Image (cartoon, rainbow, N blue to C red):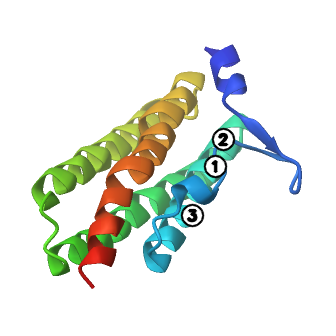
Amino acid sequence: MIIWILANININKKRGKKMAYTWDKSLETGNLIIDEQHKSLINAINELLDACSQGKGRVEVQKTLNFLSDYVVKHFNDEEKLQLKSKYPDYTAHKKLHEDFKKDVAEIVSEFEKGGATIPLVAKVNRSIGDWLIKHIKTMDKKVAQHINLNK
């Protein structure tokens, strides 16, 4: 498992710190507000992975988890309002994906509270949070953005 985690962490040469996810053009939806929020979510995931991998104290990891939990709720609410406003036809299914993701984040918070920043927790953050978010942005959120842009 440690090899898998290390294989998924890139080195950000500008900052010289470990990061699992990098923002690039493939993640842009074309909606500036949503893109900025996605960047903040990716930064929060990277900070969480960094805090766990450096063995930072529970307070630092907890702070990052709390930010991520709160920000996910804010971001999804903003995104869902845009979907409703533009009458996005897949709103219900998209909202369910958001609800499932929020449950995954809550599970990770609970797991951290019980066992701390363990290697399996870091792997779960990578798989259940980071990978899911990247895939979701590249597929589902891009569809939403296309719909919104066509229905302005």
Binning the other alpha carbons within 10 Å of mark 3 as few (below 14), some (14 to 19) or many (20 upward) gives some
Choose between 126 and 138: the one closer to the eye: 138
State the quadrant of the C terminus: bottom left
Label 1: which residue? Answer: 46
Residue in the image at 56% along x and 53% along y: 26
Secondary structure under tag 2 reads loop
Q: Quadrant of the N terminus?
A: top right
Residue that extends furthest to the front in the rendered view of this protein:
150
Amino acid type, label 2? Ala
Crowding around mark 2 (Cα neighbors within 10 Å: few <14, some 14 to 19, many 20+) is many
Mark 2, residue position: 20
Q: Say few, some or many: other residues with alpha carbon within 10 Å of mark 1 (under 14 / 14 to 19 / 20 or more).
A: many
State the residue at coordinates (37%, 68%).
75
Callout 1, which amino acid? Asn
Of discs 1 and 3, which sits in the foreground?
3
Which picture quadrant has residue 109?
Answer: top left
Does dot 1 land on a helix, a strand or a loop? helix
Q: Amino acid at mark 3?
A: Lys
Asked if disc 1 and disc 2 are in contact, CB closer than 8 Å, the reply is yes
Q: Is residue 48 left or right of residue 146?
A: right
Q: Position of residue 87 (x, y in %)?
A: 13, 73
- The residue depicted at 47 percent of the width and 57 percent of the height is 68
Identify whether 98 is placed above or below 33. Answer: above
Label 1 and label 3: CA atoms lie apart by 10 Å
x and y percentages locating residue 61 in the rendered image: 59, 48
For this view, does 5 lie left or right of residue 148? Answer: right
Give 122 or 55, whichever is nearer the viewer. 122
Residue 16 spot, x, y in % from top left: 88, 49
**Residue identifier under label 3:** 39
Tell me which numbered mark, 1 or 3, is placed earlier along the sequence: 3
For marks 2 and 3, the one nearer the N-term is: 2
Residue occupying the point 57% across, 32% down = 122
